[in-house]
Image (cartoon, rainbow, N blue to C red):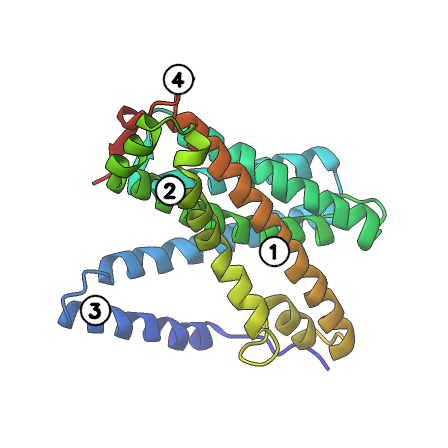
């Protein structure tokens, strides 16, 4: 079965729903209408651009070009993690922590999937490498952003309790242990909920796309199971790495809480 092509009219009808939602936000004084409209416009431009880029990459399987594309994706994801924080780390610390944590988790897991599980040749084939990295990196970005934001907020709001535990002789690890565990859970909740609801409440995006493209449902299910496991692992390891690095940055070598490293984003 051929994929049904969508017209400009079809996309316009879908866009009108977002406009109606923005109007509702305006009438209810939610203050989200500007962000929704700008987000929609940004999404359209980005997807149109990436469509042209992917068409070029698919026609030219060049590992250097694919590496450049991957690094661009990583840098943008790290920026998104940094700017989403209510209380940001000063300087480029937040950006680099996001970059390292997502690189360590997402890139290593994607490479493992391409070489060991899917075994595509060459392993950097863009039709597999770019979409797979995008799904793992995107979900890891969400988890890292949620966990990091909660960590900096909780340490600031509970600074009195943390400092009291430090004064009683606890190390920075012991004093912040409960907060760090809570933040890790926060970062993992979205993907855990997605796994619990997959197949019953919702059909995940990759599986839906493959079915619409003509892939047998059972084969699409197997790919989706693989993707969900990869996303969960990438998100989990990324969150753990980010929480550890951020916590280490906010405590000095003498186990003192250094909140002067945080700035309030307005």
User: Which residue does the numbered mark 3 point to in the structure image?
Assistant: 25
Say which residue appears at 41% left-offset and 50% top-offset: 146
Of the numbered discs 2 and 1, the one sitting upstream in the chain is 2
CA separation, marks 3 and 4?
49 Å
Compared across the picture, whether 210 is left or right of 88 comes to: right
- Helix, strand or loop for disc 1: helix
Say which of 20 and 135 sits in front: 135
Report crowding for label 4: few under 14, some 14 to 19, many 20 or more residues within 10 A (C-alpha). Answer: few
Nearer to us: label 1 or label 3:
1
CA separation, marks 4 and 2?
20 Å
Of the numbered discs 3 and 2, the one sitting upstream in the chain is 3
- Helix, strand or loop for disc 2: helix
CA separation, marks 3 and 2?
30 Å
Quadrant of the snapshot with the C terminus: top left
User: Can you give x and y, in whole percent of width and height, for residue 25 in the image?
Assistant: 21, 69
User: Which residue does the numbered mark 2 point to in the structure image?
Assistant: 151
Nearer to us: label 3 or label 2:
2
């Amino acid at each position: 079965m051929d994929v049904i092509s969508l017209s400009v009219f079809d996309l316009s009808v879908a866009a009108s729903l977002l406009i109606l939602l923005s109007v509702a936000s305006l009438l209810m004084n939610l203050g989200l209408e500007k962000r929704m409209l700008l987000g929609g416009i940004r999404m359209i431009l980005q997807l149109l651009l990436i469509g042209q880029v992917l068409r070029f990459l698919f026609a030219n399987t060049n590992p250097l070009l694919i590496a450049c594309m991957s690094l661009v994706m990583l840098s943008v994801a790290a920026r998104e993690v940094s700017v989403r924080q209510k209380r940001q780390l000063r300087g480029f610390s937040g950006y680099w922590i996001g970059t390292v944590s997502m690189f360590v988790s997402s890139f290593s897991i994607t490479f493992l999937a391409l070489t060991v599980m899917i075994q595509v040749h060459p392993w950097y084939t863009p039709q597999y490498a770019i979409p797979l990295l995008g799904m793992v990196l995107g979900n890891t970005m969400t988890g890292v952003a949620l966990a990091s934001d909660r960590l900096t907020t909780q340490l600031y709001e509970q600074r009195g309790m943390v400092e009291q535990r430090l004064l009683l002789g606890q190390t920075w690890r012991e004093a912040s242990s409960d907060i760090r565990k809570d933040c890790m859970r926060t970062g993992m909740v979205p993907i855990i909920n997605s796994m619990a609801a997959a197949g019953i409440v919702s059909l995940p995006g990759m599986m839906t796309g493959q079915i619409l493209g003509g892939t047998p449902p059972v084969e699409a299910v197997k790919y989706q199971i693989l993707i969900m496991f990869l996303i969960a692992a990438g998100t989990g390891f990324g969150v753990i790495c980010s929480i550890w690095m951020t916590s280490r940055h906010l405590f000095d070598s003498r186990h003192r809480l250094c909140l002067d490293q945080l700035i309030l984003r307005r």
